[in-house]
Image: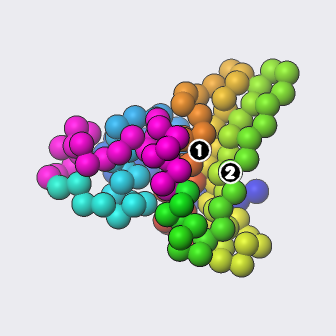
Amino acid sequence: MVNMSETLICPHCNTDVDEHPASRCLDAWVATTVMWLDLGGDASDWLTREAAKHYSTDIAVAWEIVDWIRSRQTPVEVMGDEWYDGGWWRMRVYDPTGKRITAEGYTEVEGPEREEPNVCLAICRAALKSMTTK
Ligand SMILES: [Zn+2]
């Protein structure tokens, strides 16, 4: 497993990345930190800026993140599993050699900790962490 002792906090709402729900707040965080987009305006405007795509709720848009990370010669892996009383999605980002995991995003899709939407959220979380880990 990845060392998750280092916390990563949303600059807009002060929520830990692993607890952050899929939302326009998360979309704005991903747009600026992962995709390097300038949304314009100040932080208070970000939640309503059309410039932030719906990374945390639209799989087609979330996949742009996966492609963006891959394009920087960084191996990525999206995995999912489901069983009789639960299930999950996970995205892992590796170092350039593909031998060491540098960031991981996880979301439960079935069971008591169920989160919606699912795989998009795991992608956003891994991507954000990958920007701060070496
Ligand atoms: Zn936030």
The numbered mark, 2 or 1, whose residue comes first in the sequence reads 2
Which contiguous range is marked in magenta?
41-65
Tell me, yes or no, if residue 26 can be seen here. Answer: no
Asked whether the beta carbons under mark 2 and mark 1 sit within 8 Å of each other, the answer is yes
- Quadrant containing the C terminus in the rendered view: bottom right
Residue under the point 53% across and 70% down = 71
**Amino acid type indicated by mark 1:** Ala
Identify the residue under disc 1.
122
Q: Tag 2, which secondary structure?
A: strand
User: Is residue 55 inside the magenta stretch?
Assistant: yes
- Quadrant containing the N terminus in the rendered view: bottom right
- How was the colour assigned to the protein in this rendering? rainbow
Identify the residue under disc 2.
78
Above or below: residue 28 compared with residue 71: above
Tell me, yes or no, if residue 41 can be seen here. Answer: yes
Give how far apart the Cα atoms at labels 2 and 1 are.
9 Å
Residue 34 in the image, given as x and y percentages of width and height:
43, 60
